[in-house]
Amino acid sequence: MTMQQKEHPESEEIYVCRCEEVTLEEIREWIDRGYDTVEELKRVLRVGMGPCQGRGCQDILMREIAKKTGKSITEIEPATVRPPAKPVRIGLLAEEGEK
Amino acid sequence: MTEWKNTADIVVIGGGIIGVSTAYYLALNGMKNIVLIEKGTICGGSTGRCGAGIRAQWGTEMNCRLGIAALDIFEQLDQELGMSVGLNQGGYLLVAYNEKELETLRKGMELQNSLGIKSRQINLQEAREICPGLAAEDAVGFFFHGRDGHADPFLTTFAYLEAAKRLGVVCHRHTTCTGILVENNEVRGVETDRGTIHAPVVINCAGAYAQFIARMAGIEIPNWAERHEIMITEPVAPGVCPCMLMSFSGNYYIQQRPHGSIICGMSPAGHPEDFENRSTWQFIEEMSKTLVRLLPRTKGIRIARQWSGLYDMTPDAQPIIGETDVKNFYHSTGYSGHGFMLAPVAGKILAQHIAGKTPDIDFSMLDYRRFARGEHIRESNVV
């Protein structure tokens, strides 16, 4: 970390979604443009679309939407849960299918 | 929340790529007071669930004309809309597995060539240069068009939306159309769960739900919804499947995105028509077997996610574009699984027509009354 960044912590890049490398700044910018649902932010930024499927970032995303829109976090819809629960190797599924 | 007004000059129903691009081109053609309504979120329906392929290799003249015109637009869309749409032209590689299919694809190629689409037949060795590691010894022929490829459906829709908003289009999300106002056989506006919007022109771009919107105005269209499944892998190094690898008889499409993930789908037997975007384990098992057979090196790659979406089907797998028996009530529906790739030109030509200009492509044959007249020609190149 450089001295300049230490003096200006807001200029540091905070990664909310590590799978798809989406920063807090990008998320805030798109919420301001009216993309204030998890589904839309996911589509425009790919946040939560990596192999972890949003396990690491969805709570932060929902909290940011709640803060910006003044809603309670319980009013923010999470993203649709899509299978498989964890990434599965194609070879494994293809072999299992033979049995 | 955008300010609600109970009058507009034009109401567009549907916040998928067709509705959003149509609204943009209407504004671009000088139309004012355009309101777009969407029952959920923008790009939350079939557009955001699609396979993202774009191609000009079609089997009917109309689809070829629309396909190549859409490619022309896609190629300069980043510049026009001021935002990247994720265009990647790795080509479409079509695989034939029997003589009959080879003949159908060859006829398609001749038609495409006559319309300026430079598709060509290639052999297995050439196919492997385009798609390394391809194991398709049982195939009898291959066809390729290098300008085909992929664009990002999310980014394309949002790029059109942002450009439309800059031109004054108003967008109401979370607004469901509950009725179409008709008087003396002319459209007068829409009823929604948030109130009425009076408007002299209404355009139905509701995808798989367009059949229900049409019925609200007393119009019957022969569309039906088909659920299609799809899946995507974790991102891996490029070069696994740089082109869209597709077969109609083989029943698959597979393509690696520039982002690194591989997206693929196939048509399930039966095509459930339940309007539920459910996923099945049978699909990922069947799709995995196809992947390992065609591209053995995908074996170690992991599937990140599976989902499904709805095709808005018509009996000839070609769209319905144009005015209905109710004056100034228009349709832009029935894209039969190809709405995303045709949207740029579909939005443009309908907007030109509504603005009183001559459309770039005469779409009069896409009138919905063709089905009653028995005039439709079935598109053969569909997965």
Image (cartoon, coloured by chain):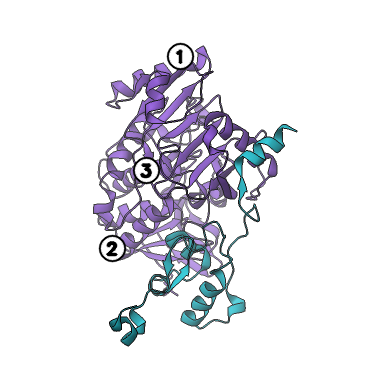
Judging depth in this view, the residue of B315 and A89 nearest the camera is A89
Tell me what residue is drawn at x 47 percent, y 24 percent: B95
Q: Quadrant of the N terminus of chain B?
A: bottom left
- Residue B336 seen by the camera: yes
> Mark 1: which amino acid?
Glu
Discs 1 and 3 carry the same chain letter = yes
N-terminal-most mark, 3 or 2 = 2
Q: Are marks 1 and 2 in contact (CB under 8 Å)?
A: no
Residue B103 - label = 1
Q: Is residue B205 above or below residue B272?
A: below
> Mark 2: which amino acid?
Leu
Judging depth in this view, the residue of B182 and B47 nearest the camera is B47
User: Chain A's shade in the image?
Assistant: cyan
Indicate which label's residue lies in the foreground, 1 or 2.
Answer: 1
Q: Position of residue B304 (x, y in %)?
A: 57, 51
Discs 1 and 2 carry the same chain letter = yes
Judging depth in this view, the residue of B347 and A94 nearest the camera is A94
User: Label 2: which residue?
Assistant: B167
Q: Please state the chain letter of the residue tagged with numbered disc 3 in the rendered image.
A: B
Q: Position of residue A90 (x, y in %)?
A: 60, 41
Tell me what residue is drawn at x 39 percent, y 41 percent: B342
Q: Position of residue B257 (x, y in %)?
A: 43, 45
